[in-house]
């Protein structure tokens, strides 16, 4: 199946900054993980679980400070995104079985990215959402590449882990390919949501 990266073209400095940062992280992931897509997913989903939680928390606090309603749907959307990304991580931990070193890298990546994204979101929420949108677009590309490796037989199409079958309500005989497609669909949805929030910054 081919990717459907509905990715907006950068229009201003904020967009170009977000895109450039995304491509730097993409280069790092390509260099470090190459075609070890399961291990790549473990690290990337660790980072991907941060933005929704940071943004949801900040907008929650914003609602409290302003003593205004109306932020609920946005908060829920962002927290649901964070939870969805957390489940992606739990699924790929079962698939990739990360080493001790990779688990330490997860800890380091989360620590660094949480602080970076929090500062970025407080001062430049539009840029932050655009960056996450581009992140998710690249995730769609990565999972499409993952599917290509499975279809070519270079990665074994193993049985889907039970956690993925339960979460996505897949068939009992579901395979890795089914899981990757489901995760990729999630990522495209997150990309669309974050690009929309970047296009309408007053909503956040």
Image (cartoon, rainbow, N blue to C red):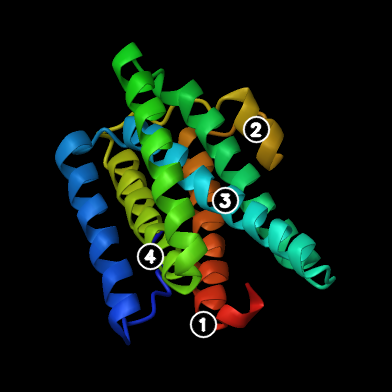
Image vertical order of residue 173 relative to residue 41, above or below: above
Q: CA distance from mark 4 to mark 3?
A: 17 Å
Q: Earlier in the sequence, mark 2 or mark 4?
A: 4
Using the image as rendered, state which of residue 152 and residue 194 is in the foreground: 194
Q: CA distance from mark 2 to mark 4?
A: 28 Å
Q: Residue furthest top?
A: 100
Between label 4 and label 3, give the one nearer the viewer. 3
Q: Earlier in the sequence, mark 1 or mark 2?
A: 2
Q: Earlier in the sequence, mark 4 or mark 1?
A: 4
The residue depicted at 44 percent of the width and 55 percent of the height is 119
State left or right for residue 80 relative to residue 96.
Answer: right
State left or right for residue 72 relative to residue 39.
Answer: right
State left or right for residue 99 relative to residue 117.
Answer: left
Residue 66 x/y as whole percent: 77, 70
Few, some or many C-alpha atoms within 10 Å of disc 1 (few <14, some 14-19, many ≥20)?
A: some
Q: Which mark is residue 54?
A: 3
Which residue is denoted by mark 4 in the rendering? 134
Q: CA distance from mark 1 to mark 2?
A: 35 Å
Between label 4 and label 1, give the one nearer the viewer. 1
Which residue is denoted by mark 2 in the rendering? 165
The residue depicted at 53 percent of the width and 40 percent of the height is 179
State left or right for residue 116 relative to residue 181.
Answer: left
* Residue 170 visible: no
- Secondary structure found at label 2: helix
Few, some or many C-alpha atoms within 10 Å of disc 3 (few <14, some 14-19, many ≥20)?
A: many
Q: Which mark is residue 199?
A: 1
């Amino acid at each position: 199946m081919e990717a459907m990266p509905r990715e907006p073209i950068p229009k201003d400095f904020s967009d170009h900054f977000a895109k450039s940062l995304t491509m730097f992280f993409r280069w790092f992931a390509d260099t470090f993980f190459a075609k070890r897509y399961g291990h790549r997913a473990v690290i990337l989903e660790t980072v991907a679980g941060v933005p929704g939680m940071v943004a949801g928390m900040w907008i929650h606090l914003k609602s409290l400070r302003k003593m205004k309603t109306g932020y609920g749907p946005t908060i829920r959307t962002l927290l649901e995104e964070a939870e969805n990304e957390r489940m992606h991580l739990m699924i790929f931990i079962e698939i990739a079985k990360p080493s001790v070193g990779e688990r330490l890298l997860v800890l380091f990546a989360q620590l660094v990215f949480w602080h970076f994204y929090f500062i970025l979101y407080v001062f430049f929420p539009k840029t932050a959402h655009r960056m996450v949108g581009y992140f998710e677009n690249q995730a769609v590309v990565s999972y499409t590449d993952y599917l290509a490796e499975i279809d070519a037989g270079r990665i074994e199409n193993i049985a889907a882990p039970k956690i993925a079958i339960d979460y996505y309500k897949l068939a009992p005989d579901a395979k890795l390919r089914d899981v990757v497609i489901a995760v990729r669909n999630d990522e495209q949805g997150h990309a669309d949501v974050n690009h929309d929030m970047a296009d309408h910054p007053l909503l956040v």
